[in-house]
Amino acid sequence: MGSVPSTPRNASVVPQDTVEYVIATFVGEKSFPLTSEFWHKLLELPLQFHWPPDRVRQACDSLAQNNYYTRHLAKLLIHLSYCLQDCISCPGAPSITFTKALNAAYLSSVFLTHTIENSKTGNFEELHLSLVDHEVPSGLPKDQSVENIIICSVLSFIGTVEASPRTYQLHCELLNFMMAAMSTQLLSGPSSGPKDFHPFLDAIMSQEASLVASVVSKLLVNYISQSLSGFSGASYSTFEGSQSGVLQKVGSAAANFVLFPLNLTVGSNNEASKSLLAQSSLHILLILVHFRSAVADDFIIGKNDGNGASDALHKEKTYFCENPFCKALENARDVEFDRLDVEGNAHSGPLARVPFASLYDTLGMCLADEAAILLLYSLVHGNADFLEYVLVRTDLDTLLMPILEILYNAPQRTSNQIYMLLIILLILSQDSTFNASVHKLDVYLHTNCLAALTNMAPHVHRLDAYASQRLVSLFHMLSRKYTKLAELQNDKMQINKVNSTEGDNMLEDVSMELHIYTDFLRIVLEIINAILTYALPRNPEVVYAVMHRQEIFEPFRNHPRFNELLENIFTVLDFFNTRLDAQELDGEWSVEKVLQVITNNCKSWHGEGMKRFTQLRFTYEQESHPEEFFIPYVWQLAVAKCGFAFSPSKINLFLVDLSRETAYRGEGDHKNHDGELSAQEVELDP
């Protein structure tokens, strides 16, 4: 091929003008067939030169303009597939094989992201992933699309090749490629529709169950192994010539160059490099698990015109296809224990095998990260085996203490983070064993989630003074709000009599809020009543707190929603007040003396006169369309945490601060004295 420059075998001495010429040839008008020597020249280049953002964007724009004729993006993906197959079939292959795969993955991510980001059609026709018939080589399956071929190869490498110093960078870059390929979701709205088109995600979801299970298992293992990933810069000598990227981080969202991992040649003390594979694996797993593909079925109904005649009307019914990655995570099993199902039969089909003990410990260490919280939710909500494993662990504090610490510092956390943690607690509190054990650790969570506390109340054991007082204070706070709303409702009713038009809407709002606080008060009374009915002898501090503030219950004694519950509370008050009155006391009553009398009389308490009510049990049920919350949430975390650059103005999946657009586009770069642009690294600040 005369137009292709020769490349010396010693890649480290390739001049920059040669590198630029080869890249320019790749994005130019001339089309090179798959069998051309040009692709070897391209993928063997040492990517160690710096380009300014405007040059990068020009290259991406050129490829987007010429790709319709050259189909170079599709051919690059096919060569990436070839390289990965070589790496899989021969783990001991020469280092140049891994270098070519690494370069192919990186270049594919760069140009793929740019094309997706600037797509003008919802079906991403600009990708031009099909080849002209005469260019399809004989060894390429003609019944498979390019996106399916490359996705199968990428997932096969991730699922079968162990992460090691030799393969670490390639694993990281393939996860970046996955992020780029799946970024079509960023252009969609939060609600999946049958007209949404995600070529690579659809290919991912069509893979064999065995491959899916191995990928889920490997992504979880990558995440678990983060504390062990001490790969240092010395380990990267596998890749000839300390590569740090011709298409280095240059702050171009259009080109997606913040993805480049070849700058990982850092010291072994750099924690960011150690956790890169773990973090990327977690975010990719969450995106895959929460993806939903909508499909519409046509059906016909009859329409009657009232005169006996009818017309056929075509309607659509939308449903979601089963997500194999979600199913694989739900069916994941502990590597140390193969549990039979309820009928005594082992699960049929391939399963993801994960060390639950290591996963449990890793989650406990990483719950400050929102993605870790989302993974924990996905496991305890969807995987019955993992939930059971969590509930039988004797060291509940491994998970609970980080959760409680986050809840205690709730103002510093996001609302989604708090929301997910409370759901996790509610799921755990549905188990009586958990409720019986949790009180041995930290009772402050009682002030954070009424539903979880209600489930726990009958099992409370030695609730301390602070928590007991907070529980009663919670009732007092709610009662004051209730009283103000009741008075306001009465005032609005008076206004309504004078001017019904003005008062109707205001009265409706007040009545709705009053109803909410009535329910809140009822639940708190249920909690107090359950403790006093089922666990009074073990909780003298609760009795003391109720006696100390007994006047706050009096206004609600005859309330129709509360009177039955308050009868029990006043039965307890009468019992202990009588015992206190019968005591002969020298001097003033002190807290210690009152508590001592209560503690002594708890032993003789038998619950006479107490009415037993059906215990409230709260369970968690996922919304009918959970993807509307989880898909934007997962991508928001991935974009913020993984350094994945995508133009904020192009994102429709979630709200973005558009003031960051300048930084994304590299407009913060400044010129040298000679007027040339110098590359400045610009990353998304989480």
Image (tube, grey):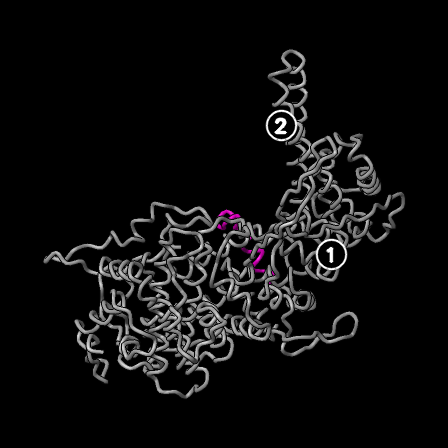
Quarter location, residue 174: bottom left
Magenta residues span 399-415
Q: Say whether residue 412 is magenta.
A: yes
Vertical relation: 151 (above or below) 477: below
Q: Secondary structure at mark 1?
A: loop
Q: Identify which residue is drawn at 55% across, 67% down.
A: 206
The mark that comes first in sequence, 2 or 1, is 1
- In the image, farthest residue toward the top: 498
Q: Quadrant of the C terminus?
A: bottom left
Helix, strand, or loop for circle 2? helix
Residue 292 is tagged as none
Residue 129 at what x, y percent from top left? 40, 65
Query: What amino acid does circle 1 point to?
Result: His
Residue at mark 2 to residue at mark 1: CA–CA distance: 40 Å
| Amino acid type, label 2 | Asp
Residue 262: x, y in percent?
Answer: 32, 72
Q: Which residue is mark 2?
A: 509
Prevalent SS, magenta region: helix
